[in-house]
Image (cartoon, grey):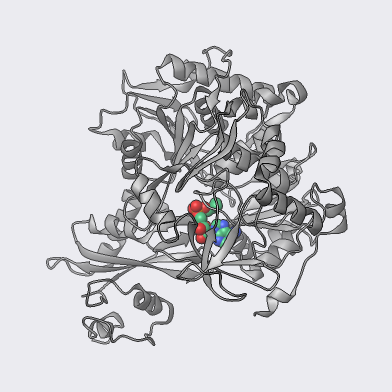
Amino acid sequence: MSEHEQTLFPPPADVASSARISSMEQYRELYRESLDDPDAFWAREAGQLLWRKPWDRLLDWQPPFAKWFVGGQLNVSENCLDRHLKTRGDQTALLWEGEPGEVLAITYRQLHERVCRCASALTELGVQAGDRVILYLPMIPEAAVAMLACARIGAVHSVIFGGFSADAIRERTQDAGAETIITADGNFRRGQALPLKANVDSALAGLDQVKRVLVVRRTGSEISMQSGRDLWWHEVVDSASPDFPPPAFDANHPLFILYTSGSTGKPKGILHGSGGYLAGASLTTKYVFDLRDEDLYWCTADVGWITGHSYIVYGPLAQGATTLLYEGAPNQPAEDRFWDIIERHRVTVFYTAPTAVRAFMKWGRVHPQKHDLSSLRLLGSVGEPINPEAWHWYHQQIGGGRCPILDTWWQTETGAHMLTPLPGATPLKPGSATLPFFGVEADIVDEQGQPVPPHTRGLLVIRRPWPSLMQGLYGDAERYQEVYWSRFPGTYLAGDAATRDEDGYFWVIGRIDDVLNVSGHRLGTAEIESALVDHDAVAEAAVVGRPDEIKGESIVAFVILKGRYQDSPDLRAELRQHVAKVIGAIARPDEVRITPGLPKTRSGKIMRRLLKEITRTGEISGDVTTLDDPQIVDALLGRN
Ligand code: WT7
């Protein structure tokens, strides 16, 4: 295969000698145990969490539904907070930096108190175990506090990324049946105060399902408060009781819903449980980031994505780590903000996305070179395959050639890392997420479900359930079964294509469905298409991804206008803006092309392959004989 696979980066001796897993033999032994004797493996590993009642049975597997730690009881927030008070009460749990520059170190004791007050306030407001609570917040401490407070009272949080629009909030609020929303007046991004509360207000217009909106004051912007519904966080939380003993919940009590894009217009509500999810997030944090007391760990994701859930909040706090939360943009006030943060706080473990690395590359190495990054010992990558060029730059310019790069493959659905190197054990190959984590039986199969030989492209599957597997899609058992488990019964279909090399290393290629990966964020083409068709001028739309140097993929929309509309730059700009309004700025197409028709098969299916090729090369080389109207190709290529 390609030559970059030849280069192996063995773990540096100093990393290996101090790591929890310090050789491939040790990894293999534990990996074997995790598959051959899961009872022993999980009794030892998950047994380190605080269980209020031990489980009776490790797994109840009724495909496609898995229940882990059956009969066990725990409280997730107790595991992330109370459990550490004796040993780490005065250690910083959350180190927060606001975009304008404030720094706040919140100890475990303080975080515990804040979470208890929030739990008391929510309870006084009538929120109960099992109720869904929408969180639409900036990257401020209150985001973590609200998540943990929901966990403490057994309410199910659903965090909506702050970049999503009013329509997206409304859709998710309705789907989740939430009566409570926690938001802020606004958030700071690139020096500007962007509205959050105003978006919630428009989302809720005419919707009386939501009974209460708790509002954190962050930007101080002018907002309207609806009496009887809206309450200031500082008025109800700060004065609420700091005593809130954690109730014990069933190991399979739901913890959160997180919406993610699929191949239809409707986002999927990924539902995660308590014990299994926490075991997965906690164990991967322990072994992959190999955290120890001196570490300052920083994951740059937003809490609105699964990475923020598992690797800013739940995993690190379950491990008693110090986790850094940064509110703003990487280039505010300048392109060296991240390196400045690393230098000032002496960050040791840094976890970011390939799209960010490519942006750093574009901004130039002068920015990291201005700073002392010698505190770093491990680097992480997540969200898409990291191209070897970005890998080498990250390794050299940020890691000074000393720090292993942990390329972690996983998904919202998997809850925690699935394919990943271990820093002290796994020799790295740039671009490969390497080998399966403990308990993960990964494989690559052909269309019939048969394992493919090395270097052959196939479908990435997981052959048995693992603890942090989602519990299902909220309110849609059928879609859960259909999307993930119907192709190969009893086997989880990840939706990614991959190959494996002769060493068993996995090389993830990308999605097999109509899902784009834009800056590490998943966006369904169908969702963007339905946002376009929602505009009065649009008769039909087809969206494809085009490779993009920084974002991984950029969004190109082919649009057929209704007869009375005419192509114009203004209209195209309006359509792009319309998508941003309906879904959020992250979904705004980079380009809108007006076309008289779309390439379709005789059965009416849009041939995206052709559209992709046109956006990439401006040509069509492949077979067009199955097209219903071959003339459309000329029109798309601008030949008539
Ligand atoms: C999809 C999941 C998991 C948190 C971030 C995204 C792609 C993710 C990698 C990686 C290659 C990756 C896959 C996956 N992906 N990490 N290290 N190498 N591809 O979560 O939004 O649920 O998206 O992201 O295509 O299926 P998500």
Is any atom of residue 214 visible in this view?
yes
The percent coordinates of residue 302 (x first, y second) are 54, 44
Left or right for 371, reference 435: right
Quarter of the picture containing the C terminus is: bottom left
Left or right for 128, reference 453: left
Left or right for 65, reference 177: right
Left or right for 242, reference 601: right
Give the answer, above or below, for where 39 lies relative to 262. Answer: above
Quarter of the picture containing the N terminus is: bottom right
Residue at x-position 68% and y-position 50%: 36
Residue at x-position 26% and y-position 65%: 541
The percent coordinates of residue 479 (x first, y second) are 35, 50
The percent coordinates of residue 337 (x first, y second) are 64, 49
The percent coordinates of residue 376 (x first, y second) are 77, 50
Residue at x-position 71% and y-position 67%: 429
Give the answer, above or below, for where 411 lies relative to 74. Answer: below
